[in-house]
Image (cartoon, rainbow, N blue to C red):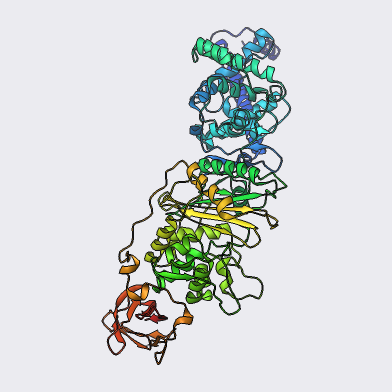
């Protein structure tokens, strides 16, 4: 019998409220749980995605790492060995000296730095969770910050983007930047950044600036006390400034030492000894060596962090001290310029532009090595050198030192006396004026000027003036720089290497960036003869003989005193005078400049090196054994003979002519030389070297040394000579 519909509906309603048992009880909760799990998973994923998106947006908002800041450093000028000569503060007045690498810092300092600041520096990836946890626990348990949780990488991030606020947001920013740094840079590079940017109080940034300012030395060698102090200062650089709060700095240093003892990195005895050392209370001035050279280098190499020079800091310091001491004795307005050069390379080893860079009375900031001044007699050796090269005179030849007139010009000696007949050697050693002018008259003033210019010595003549004989006695302008360069040519047996003060930053170690070609000054034999003569010049009082070849000079009116000398290794030039050009009564090269020259050689710390040996073909003989034409020099005015004899004259080849001596087989054919006049026998010289005698017809075939300019000289039995220059092709 079927149930009524009302009953069925009532049962259905009642069944919905029955407790779920059996299969229904097992299935219904499971469906709800899975639904809940799915909802939680979806919500978690959404949160993760949103968090990741927010993190990505935050990182993107940070932009790229501001590493350009680390590239802005003080310009530093260093010597040939990397020693600091001078540094220049940055535009904002801060000192941040460039550091080549952490290898140039004392390893003891690095051990203390890493032990105190970041023990796991080489293990973490920019953020150290253990350090952060320790710092948080100490903050909770002690109520104050005992040790920070920042790694060195995080500190570098903060230094790259300095912010005053200290917040969770700032710490997160540092952590993100630290992770970026670790991805882009090596540990060594990050450590180098810290060592360059860390603050040390005032306008000092970086370990190098701090070490030089506080201890007066590079951070390569630091004591334990110095290392601990430099580790402590960046924690609170202004509160621990040595020039304001030395007590705070000492307490912080001792705290570093105690912690290192507690961790077993430093022995208690060493720490106690380090604590007994006081801390500096004043900053030391930054080094200023070779200020003139440094200024020139900084002007030429703008925006270059490290400018390498050829200077030697030890020699530079010694010669600066010498110039300052001697200028004090000579007078309040006297300045001194000194230039020391390595003969072989042409590298400038010392550049002293004035006696005192900061002395206004001496115009200390004027570089007197570059000032154009009258050279006095210092050009005479080059006159003699060209005369030796031309072959019409020898160091043992006799020459007249008697009153003579060359047109309207009548030179006189410095002491207003004359020596009569003297050897050429003695004439140069005594710096006699008449013999020098007589030789210059034969050499030719224009040719003399051209030859010096060819070798890098620019002679400055008065406006509208042509080269004349007076230039042999100082009637011309020259700089100490150019004069020293010319003298290195004598020391190098006739070839000049242009002087160099800067080393190319991109040069390879082998080449040194040196692409300078040697310049010709004179023939090797002539250069050796000049050096041999100057070696015998009487030295100043109490100085050793035959050690340094040198020449002195005094300009007209006692305005400039000079002395330039060389040995087998080095050439040094000295100028003494007033920068304003005013006369100084009694200022003589031999008395004022020569003693400084000899003292300068002594202060280089090296014994004088012997001069080069005589080149092949050098004629070394006494006057009696010289060829007859070389025994006595006769000036141009003595070429006319008595009776019917004519003056010696080369008829062929003509002066300045071009001669085609090619044989078609790659060799040069002989060149005929024909002479008129003169007294037999006659000798032919090719570039100063004897090439045989003329035959009875006054002719001879000579073999040219090669293509190019060749100097042909013919000398007769009475010492008369004629010279032509031809071009062989």
Which residue is rendered at x = 61% and y = 50% of the image? Answer: 336
Q: Nearer the viewer, residue 499 or 397?
A: 397
Q: Position of residue 468 (x, y in %)?
A: 57, 74
Name the quadrant of the C terminus: bottom left
Query: Residue 339: x and y, percent?
Result: 54, 51
Q: Percent position (x, y) of residue 388?
A: 41, 69
Residue 515 or residue 720, whichever sits in front: 720
Q: Residue furthest bottom?
A: 644
The quadrant of the picture occupied by the N terminus is: top right
Q: Image check: 36 left or right of 82?
A: right
- 20 to 609, vertically: above or below: above
Quarter of the image for residue 287 reads top right
User: Can residue 389 be seen in the rendering of this structure?
Assistant: yes
Up-down: is 604 above or below 244? below
Q: Residue pushed farthest left?
A: 665
Residue 643 versus residue 689 in the image, above or below: below
Q: Is residue 353 visible?
A: no
| Residue 2 horizontal side relative to residue 245, left or right | left
Q: Which residue appears at 54% of the width and 8% of the height?
A: 22
Position of residue 657 measured from the top left corner of the image (x, y, whole percent): 42, 85
């Amino acid at each position: 019998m079927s149930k009524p519909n009302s009953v069925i509906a009532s049962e259905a309603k009642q069944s919905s409220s029955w407790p779920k048992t059996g299969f229904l009880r097992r299935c219904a909760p499971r469906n709800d749980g899975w639904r809940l799990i799915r909802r939680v998973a979806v919500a978690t994923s959404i949160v993760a995605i949103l968090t990741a998106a927010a993190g990505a947006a935050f990182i993107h908002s940070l932009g790229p790492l501001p590493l350009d800041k680390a590239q802005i450093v003080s310009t530093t000028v260093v010597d040939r060995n990397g020693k600091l000569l001078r540094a220049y503060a940055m535009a904002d007045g801060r000192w941040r000296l460039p550091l080549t690498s952490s290898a140039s810092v004392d390893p003891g300092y690095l051990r203390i730095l890493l032990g105190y600041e970041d023990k796991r520096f080489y293990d973490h990836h920019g953020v150290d969770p253990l350090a952060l946890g320790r710092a948080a626990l100490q903050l909770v348990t002690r109520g104050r910050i005992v040790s920070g949780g920042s790694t060195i990488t995080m500190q570098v991030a903060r230094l790259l983007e300095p912010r005053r606020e200290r917040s969770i947001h700032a710490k997160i920013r540092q952590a993100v930047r630290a992770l970026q740094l670790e991805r882009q840079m090596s540990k060594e590079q990050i450590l180098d950044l810290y060592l360059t940017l860390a603050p040390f109080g005032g306008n000092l940034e970086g370990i190098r600036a701090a070490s030089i300012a506080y201890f007066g030395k590079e951070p390569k060698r630091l004591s334990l006390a110095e290392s601990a102090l430099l580790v402590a200062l960046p924690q609170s650089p202004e509160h621990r400034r040595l020039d304001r709060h030395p007590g705070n700095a000492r307490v912080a240093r001792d705290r570093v030492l105690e912690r290192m003892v507690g961790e077993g990195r430093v022995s208690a005895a060493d720490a106690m000894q380090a604590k007994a050392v006081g801390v500096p209370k004043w900053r030391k001035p930054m080094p200023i060596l070779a200020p003139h050279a440094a200024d020139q280098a900084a002007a030429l190499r703008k925006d270059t962090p490290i400018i390498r020079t050829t200077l030697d800091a030890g020699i530079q310091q010694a010669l600066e001290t010498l110039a300052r001491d001697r200028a004090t004795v000579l007078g309040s307005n006297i300045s001194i310029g000194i230039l020391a050069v390595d003969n072989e390379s042409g590298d400038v080893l010392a550049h002293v532009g004035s006696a005192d860079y900061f002395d206004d009375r001496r115009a200390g900031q004027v570089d007197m090595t570059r000032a154009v001044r009258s050279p006095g007699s210092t050009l005479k050796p080059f006159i003699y050198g060209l005369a030796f090269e031309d072959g019409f005179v020898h160091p043992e030849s006799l020459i007249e030192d008697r009153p003579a007139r060359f047109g309207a010009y009548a030179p006189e000696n410095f002491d207003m006396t004359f020596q009569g007949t003297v050897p050429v050697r003695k004439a140069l050693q005594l710096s006699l004026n008449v013999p020098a002018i007589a030789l210059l008259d034969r050499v030719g003033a224009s040719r003399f000027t051209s030859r010096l210019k060819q070798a890098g010595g620019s002679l400055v003549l008065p406006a509208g003036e042509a080269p004349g004989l007076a230039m042999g006695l100082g009637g011309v302008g020259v700089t100490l720089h150019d004069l020293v360069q010319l003298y290195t040519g004598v020391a190098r047996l006739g070839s000049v290497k242009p002087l160099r003060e800067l080393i190319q930053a991109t040069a390879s170690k082998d080449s040194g960036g040196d692409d300078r070609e040697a310049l010709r000054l004179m023939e090797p034999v002539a250069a050796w003869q000049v050096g041999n003569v100057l070696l015998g010049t009487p030295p100043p009082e109490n100085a050793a003989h035959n050690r340094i070849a040198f020449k002195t000079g005094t300009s007209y009116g006692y305005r400039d005193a000079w002395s330039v000398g060389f040995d087998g290794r080095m050439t040094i030039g000295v100028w003494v005078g007033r920068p304003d050009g005013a006369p100084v009564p009694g200022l003589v090269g031999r008395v004022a400049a020569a003693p400084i020259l000899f003292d300068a050689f002594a202060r280089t710390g090296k014994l004088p090196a012997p001069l080069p040996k005589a080149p092949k073909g050098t004629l070394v003989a006494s006057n009696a054994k010289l060829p007859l034409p070389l025994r006595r020099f006769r000036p141009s005015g003595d070429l006319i003979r008595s009776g019917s004899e004519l003056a010696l004259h080369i008829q062929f080849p003509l002066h300045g002519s071009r001669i085609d001596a090619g044989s078609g087989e790659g060799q040069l054919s002989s060149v005929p030389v024909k002479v008129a006049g003169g007294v037999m026998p006659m000798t032919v010289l090719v570039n100063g070297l004897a090439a045989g005698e003329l035959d009875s017809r006054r002719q001879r075939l000579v073999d040219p040394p090669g293509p190019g300019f060749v100097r042909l000289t013919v000398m007769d039995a009475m010492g008369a000579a004629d010279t032509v220059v031809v071009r062989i092709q």
